[in-house]
Amino acid sequence: MNLLAIDGITVFMALLAVVAFLYAAVGHGGASGYLALMALWSFPVSVMKPTALVLNLFVAAVSFISYQRKGYFNAKLFWSFAIASVPTAFLGGMIVIDAAIYKKILAVLLVFAILKMLGVFGTEKSETKEVPFWQGMIAGASIGLFSGMIGIGGGIILSPLILILGWGKMKEAAAVSAAFIWVNSAAGLIGHLSRGVVVEPQAFVLVAVAVAGGLAGGYLGSIKLNNLTLKRVLAFVLVIACAKLFLT
């Protein structure tokens, strides 16, 4: 499938840059947003997952570097989840899901992403506490498995979880989520490739567009960025994609 020959690809790439910008600004790779756009443009499910994971690897890396340079990365917090998530993300990538069921699961995930973009989740606690070992393992393993199956990095789930349970501050959660997304996306992609899934060569053109947006988002987000209007626009796009997935 030639991704660059799809009708409206110019508009798609413009929105892709905006999605990467906004997600990188909050320490996310953006897979849920990329999957939403690909659903709107009727990409096959077999193309959606590996493409989103490849995009995630680059954008999450850009976001992580921006936050890490500012000193927000908490390695201990990261490993609390990553130790269990990496192997389960690989296993999740090896699981084949029926296309119709996949679209419904993705639609539910997008509801979560919409709420995150609108600020329903994400209020940091005044004091933080360490992650209990068993809770970190269970959370990491569960998010990793789900991430590998759906084709995301899991940051859209981990970030609010850290904030809600008081395990870290806002920017600390963003830095940890970016690293978490990268390792899970890599493990999930390897799982997909191990069962014969192919990444379309044109996906790397999309990577260049997403990285451009991610560079700007990661840089501004690591300093200070709270553009509510852009977040509402993205939430609106996700709502449309969500409705299409539920109805198809």
Image: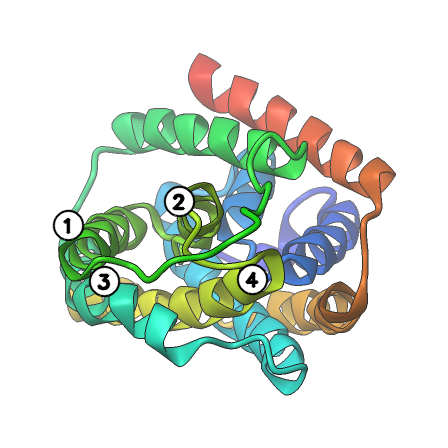
**Considering only order in the chain, which callout, 2 or 3, is on the residue closer to the N terminus?**
3
149 with respect to 114 (left or right): left
For the residue marked with disc 3, what is the amino acid? Ser
Give the quadrant of residue 140: bottom left
- Could you say whether the residue bearing mark 3 is in a helix, strand or loop? helix
The label nearer to you, 3 versus 1, is: 3
Indicate which disc, 2 or 1, sits on the residue closer to the N terminus.
1
User: How many angstroms separate mark 3 from mark 4 (CA)?
Assistant: 17 Å
- Of circles 3 and 2, the one toward us is 2
Q: Position of residue 80 (x, y in %)?
A: 27, 67
Label 3 neighbour load within 10 Å: few <14, some 14-19, many 20+: many
Q: Position of residue 48 (x, y in %)?
A: 44, 49
Q: Is residue 54 above or below residue 76?
A: above
**Can you identify the residue that label 4 sits on?**
174
In space, the residues marked 2 and 1 are separated at their CA atoms by 30 Å
**Mark 1: secondary structure:** loop
Labels 1 and 4 touching (C-beta < 8 A): no
Q: Can the viewer see residue 156?
A: yes
The relative height of residue 1 versus residue 39 in the rendered view (above or below) is below
Find disc 1 in the rendering and name its residue: 95
Query: What amino acid is labelled 2 in the image?
Result: Leu
Which residue is outermost to the front?
Answer: 127
Q: Which mark is residue 85?
A: 3
Number of the front mark, 2 or 4:
2
Quadrant in which residue 200 is drawn? bottom left
Residue drawn at the location 23% of the way across and 62% of the way down:
85
Q: Residues within 10 Å of mark 4 (few under 14, many from 20)?
A: many
Q: Measure the alpha-carbon separation of dots 3 and 2.
A: 19 Å
- Residue appearing at x 60%, y 29% in the figure: 120
Give the labeled residue for mark 2.
165
